[in-house]
Image (cartoon, rainbow, N blue to C red):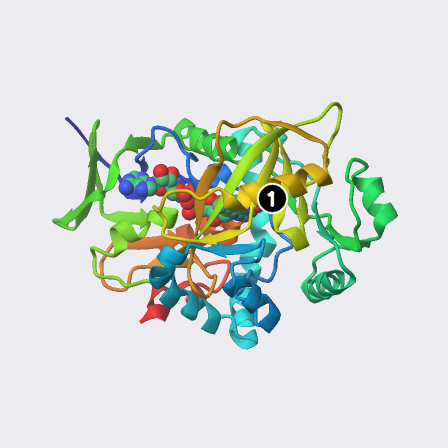
């Protein structure tokens, strides 16, 4: 069996791990990227809605509006569902999420992430140029539709708030919506159009292109299982079917599976998941969708991917590994068919994934408090495609002793005690 040595092992080849590996490599580190799959970007980083959310300054927090909370509690919201049988497991985390969502704490989370959000598109552009995949970035922005005057007013208020931090946007009336997306049908109170965010029509291919750039530049990829991690003689070692790999430093970038490593090492970081689904459908006839469109009141999004129109759902609170429950896709399908001319499903069954989330919606990035050479980079919640490259830079700067471009303090694992 082969035995490989490097300066750093990065565990997890999703958008977050691949981006960290590239940034470490740029700074002269010899890196081995380890994943249980043979290819990068096969999990959460494959299935997302493809938006580089450079306009999403405020993370999605637990609502404080009583009416909304009641809808959630009754499991009647199209945005959020919970599994009743998993509720005892989810409840303590949901309580922490609720507490972290007070206006002051939510603002703190947003301000911590702001430098990363503002840098997100720039960082992708640089990597896409180097990887030679400019066609994986569409400069379409995205549209948030509202069906009632009340929700439109909330949406416009959110936009006005984000505008204070440099976010560009445009409020659209029915005519302006039709001008942008002539194939939509429905009664809309209006929409907010965010022109700046990028759209990636194949997020899995983007993670693979970044991984290909990493190996082209001399990086190595090992199929291995993070659960085999052991520490000895100042080195960390993992193994897989092709052999083992060891390094003095290790980065945990396992997204929703990061607890497989940090928990056995004694860290009780409250990593939870917000599960989500997608299904591709063929557009009917010559119908074209030019932007990702969030049908905000009805809780689903349509995105014009290379494979077809990708319908993505809102949030499901259930155990990461619990069997899929396609009810959110089933509920969204007739609404989506009414919004846009959709034909047959392209996929045999819906895809299920899990957004890795900390209760304050801020990822954990930085040194592990109690183990030399152990670094964390996970919990990118709804924004992992967006933030992968920016957080990869931040982590690599911390690991190589450069001055970090953003204050890393709010990302420390130590905030959880
Ligand atoms: C429906 C949905 C829509 C979304 N839309 C967007 C969006 O529009 N924009 C956006 O920015 N974000 C979006 N997100 C969030 C985004 O997809 C995630 O935050 C992001 O993909 C997390 O990336 P990651 O690299 O941390 O995790 P992952 O991509 O899941 O990568 C983790 C890696 O760890 C590997 N792994 C797991 N266990 C082991 C093991 N034991 N040994 C070795 N390797 C292992 C996995 O194989 C995987 O490759 C969405 C998410 C969902 C679910």
Q: Is residue 282 above or below residue 31?
A: above
x and y, in percent, of residue 196 in the image: 70, 48
Q: In this view of the protein, which residue sits in the foreground, 76 or 398?
A: 76
Q: Is residue 55 above or below residue 221?
A: below
- List the single residue furthest toward the right: 175
Element type where label 1 sits in the image = helix
Label 1 residue near ligand 1, CB within 8 Å: no
- Left or right of 198? Residue 357 is left
Q: Is residue 323 above or below residue 97?
A: above
Which residue is painted at 78% across and 35% down in the image?
183
x and y, in percent, of residue 301 in the image: 63, 44
Residue 305, quarter of the rendered image: top right
Which residue is painted at 69% across and 46% down in the image?
142
Residue 130, quarter of the rendered image: top right
x and y, in percent, of residue 88 in the image: 34, 63
x and y, in percent, of residue 218 in the image: 37, 30
Q: Where the N terminus falls, by quadrant?
A: top left
Report the number of numbered marks.
Answer: 1
- List the single residue furthest toward the top: 285
**Quarter containing ligand 1?**
top left
Q: Where the C terminus falls, by quadrant?
A: bottom left
- Left or right of 304? Residue 116 is left
Q: In this view of the protein, which residue sits in the foreground, 229 or 147?
A: 147
Residue 16 in view, yes or no: no
Which residue is painted at 40% across and 53% down in the image?
318
Where does label 1 land, which residue? 332
Q: In this view of the protein, which residue sits in the foreground, 214 or 239?
A: 239
Residue 67 in view, yes or no: yes
């Amino acid at each position: 069996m082969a035995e490989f040595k490097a300066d750093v092992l990065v565990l997890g080849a999703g958008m977050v791990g691949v981006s960290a590996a590239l940034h470490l490599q740029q700074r002269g580190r010899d890196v081995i990227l380890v994943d249980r799959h043979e290819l990068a970007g096969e999990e959460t980083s494959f299935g997302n809605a493809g938006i580089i959310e450079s306009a999403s300054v405020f993370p999605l927090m637990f609502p404080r509006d009583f009416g909304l909370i009641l809808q959630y509690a009754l499991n009647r919201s199209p945005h959020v569902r919970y599994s009743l049988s998993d509720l005892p497991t989810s409840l303590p985390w949901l309580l922490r999420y609720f507490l972290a969502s007070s206006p002051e704490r939510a603002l703190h989370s947003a301000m911590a992430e702001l430098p990363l959000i503002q840098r997100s598109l720039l960082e992708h552009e640089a990597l896409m140029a180097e990887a030679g995949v400019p066609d994986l970035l569409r400069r379409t922005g995205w549209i948030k539709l509202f069906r009632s005057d009340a929700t439109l007013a909330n949406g416009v208020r959110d936009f006005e708030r984000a505008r204070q931090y440099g976010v560009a946007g445009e409020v659209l009336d029915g005519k302006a919506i039709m001008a942008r997306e002539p194939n939509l049908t429905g009664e809309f109170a209006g929409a907010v159009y965010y022109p700046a965010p990028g759209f990636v029509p194949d997020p899995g291919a983007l993670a693979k292109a970044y991984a290909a750039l990493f190996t082209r530049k001399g990086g190595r990829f090992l199929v291995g299982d993070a659960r085999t991690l052991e520490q000895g003689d100042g080195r960390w070692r993992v193994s897989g079917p092709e052999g083992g790999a060891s390094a003095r430093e290790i980065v945990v970038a396992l997204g929703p599976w990061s607890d497989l490593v940090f928990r056995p090492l004694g860290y009780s970081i409250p990593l939870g998941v917000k599960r989500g689904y997608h299904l591709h459908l063929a557009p009917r006839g010559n119908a074209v969708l030019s932007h990702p469109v969030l049908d905000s009141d009805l809780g689903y999004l349509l995105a014009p991917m290379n494979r077809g129109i990708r319908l993505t759902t809102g949030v499901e609170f259930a155990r990461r590994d619990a069997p899929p429950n396609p009810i959110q896709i089933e509920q969204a399908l007739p609404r989506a068919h009414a919004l846009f001319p959709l034909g047959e499903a392209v996929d045999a069954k819906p895809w299920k994934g899990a957004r890795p989330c900390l209760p304050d919606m801020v990822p954990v990035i930085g040194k592990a408090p109690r183990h030399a050479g152990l670094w964390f980079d996970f919990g990118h919640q709804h924004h992992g495609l967006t933030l992968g490259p920016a957080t990869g830079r931040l982590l690599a700067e911390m690991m190589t002793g450069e001055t970090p471009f953003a204050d890393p303090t709010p990302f420390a694992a130590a905030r959880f005690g």
